[in-house]
Each structure stands twice: as C-alpha cells, then as structure tokens.
Amino acid sequence: MNCHRRRVRVGHVVAALALGVMAAACGDGQGPVLLRQVRARQLAAELLVQFTAAADAGNRAVMADTDELSAAFSHEAGLAKEVVRRGVDELKPLLAGLGESEESQRLDEFGGLYAEYEVLDRGILELAVENSNLKAQRLSFGPIREAADSFRDALAQVAASSPPEDIWRVRALVAEAVSALRGIQVLEARHIAEPEDATMTRIEQEMAASGADARSALHVLGDVVPEAARERLAAATAALERFLGLHAELVALSRRNTNVRSLSLSLGRKRLLRAACEESLRAMRDVLEQRGSGATR
C-alpha cells in the first residue's frame, strides 16, 4: 500500500515537472515571465539614469573652460548615450514579448523624442568642443593685450623724445592713437559675448573705424616727430599691425560663436527635449513597477 502511494506521489511530481518545463518552453510559465518583467523594470530604470547622465555630461561640456574638459565631458556623454541606445534595443522586443502595450507605447514615444534630442545634442557638443568664444577671449586677454601695451609703450617713448615746441601736439596724437586701440579692446569683449549677427556687424564697424583712427594718428605723427623718434614710431607701427592682425583672428573666432550658440541651445531646445524624454521614461518605469507589484501580490 505504501509503495503504491509513493509511486502515485512520484508520478504527480514528474507530471508537474513536465508541465512546468512545457510551460517554460512556451513562455507561459510564471518564472520566465517574472524574470522578463524584472529585467524590463531594470532596463527602464537604467535608461532614465543613463539618459540623465548623458544630458548632465553634455551640459558640463558646454560649460567647460578648456578644450580638454569639453572633449572629456563630450566623450562621457557619448558613452552614456550608447548605453541608452543599447537599452532601448533590448527593452523593445522584451516589452513586445510580454504584450505590455502601454509600456511599448511609452518606449516608442521616448524613441521619437530621443532621436530628435540626439541630433540636437550632437550639434551642441560639436559646437562646445570648438570653444571659439573662449579662444577669442584668451586671444583678447593675452597676445592682443600685449600688442596694445607694446603700442602704448612705444608711443610713450615717441612723445618723450619730441621737441618742446611739438610736445603737446605729439601727446595729443599719441593719446588719440592709444585711445583708439583701447576702444577696440573694450568692443572686443562685447563682440565675443554678442549672440546677434547684426549687432556684431555694427560692433565690427565701430572697431574698424577705431583702427583707421589709430593708423591716421600714426601717419600724422610721421610728419611731426624728429629723426631720433623714428625708430620708436616704427616699433609702434609694427605693434599696431600685429594688434590688428590678431584682432582679425579674434573677430573670425567670435563670429563662429560656438560657446554662445551651444549654451543658448542647451538652455532652450535641449532643456525642453530633455524634460520630455525624462517624462516618457519615468512614465514607462512607473507603469512597469505598478504592473510588477500587482503581479507579485
């Protein structure tokens, strides 16, 4: 009797195991479904984390004050975005296999927004790593300032070597020339920060007029100063040409406006797209978590 009962129990266990294996193979067993649900929730949470990390790294690339930092943060953003792409590729068929239509809809919504976001972000990062405004600023505070100071110092020596009868006229011309260059330097700062092309054009016209004034003052000085001051006047002229050559480089860099444009896009379109992407990811994650908690009760 006992042997018969044991055989019955063993038969029941074998049958149950067989049914379990069949159900697992068909994908209808609770084990595989629960595992896939858990994996889907993990992926949804990771997508949100990595997307946020990519967006933050991109913002740091825009705000970085060196080419090296901009490139490093841009690379960091690229790595996080690659994780996002892989996560979407894995999650999409997983949700489809589970028949989770609402979550799939949220993922498709995110995919559409993310495609637009990625194109915009790629353009922003390309602008950020160029750092044209920062390079223009360094040029203004470095070589251009040095050339302007050399110009001022050379003209001061010209004035010091002028005869008494011409001293006041020479000093006036020197002051006019130096003031013209200092005016250009002030306008350079405005030009570097200016986002509007039309305003930049007006600033360039003012700077060109000041450059012409400086050249004109030097030309008149050439007719006034004594032979002993000619060498220092030549040094001033060379410094002026060096200044204006560097200034032309600055204007070209400033015109590209990559830092200004990347910051404007980051604070505008990118910020809005980022919020929409994060909202879609949170909604998908929340639905998956609610469904998962309901399935385990």
Image (cartoon, helix red, strand yellow):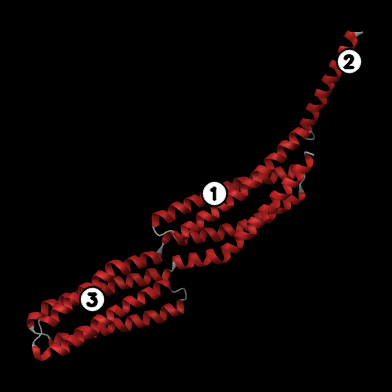
Task: Determine the secondary structure under disc 2.
Answer: helix
Q: Is residue 297 above or below residue 22?
A: below
Distance Cα–Cα, label 3 vs label 1: 49 Å
Label 1: how many Cα within 10 Å (few below 14, some 14–19, many 20+): some
Distance Cα–Cα, label 3 vs label 2: 106 Å
Left or right for 176, reference 265 = left
Q: Quadrant of residue 245?
A: bottom left
Residues tagged 3 and 1 counted as in contact (Cβ below 8 A): no
Left or right for 94, reference 242 = right
**Nearer the camera: disc 3 or disc 2:** 2
Q: Which residue is mark 2?
A: 8
- Residue type at numbered disc 3: Leu
Task: Determine the secondary structure under disc 1.
Answer: helix
Q: Is residue 168 above or below residue 284?
A: below
Q: Which residue is mark 1?
A: 80
Residue at the far front: name it. 297
Q: Is residue 43 above or below residue 250?
A: above
Q: Position of residue 115 (x, y in %)?
A: 61, 57
- Residue type at numbered disc 2: Val
Q: Which residue is mark 3?
A: 240
Mark with earlier residue (3, 1): 1
Q: Quadrant of the C terminus?
A: top right
Which residue is painted at 12% across and 85% down in the image? 225
Which residue is painted at 51% across and 51% down in the image? 78
- Residue type at numbered disc 1: Ala
Q: Position of residue 8 (x, y in %)?
A: 88, 15
Q: Quadrant of the N terminus?
A: top right
Q: Position of residue 205 (x, y in %)?
A: 37, 82
Label 2: how many Cα within 10 Å (few below 14, some 14–19, many 20+): few
Label 3: how many Cα within 10 Å (few below 14, some 14–19, many 20+): many
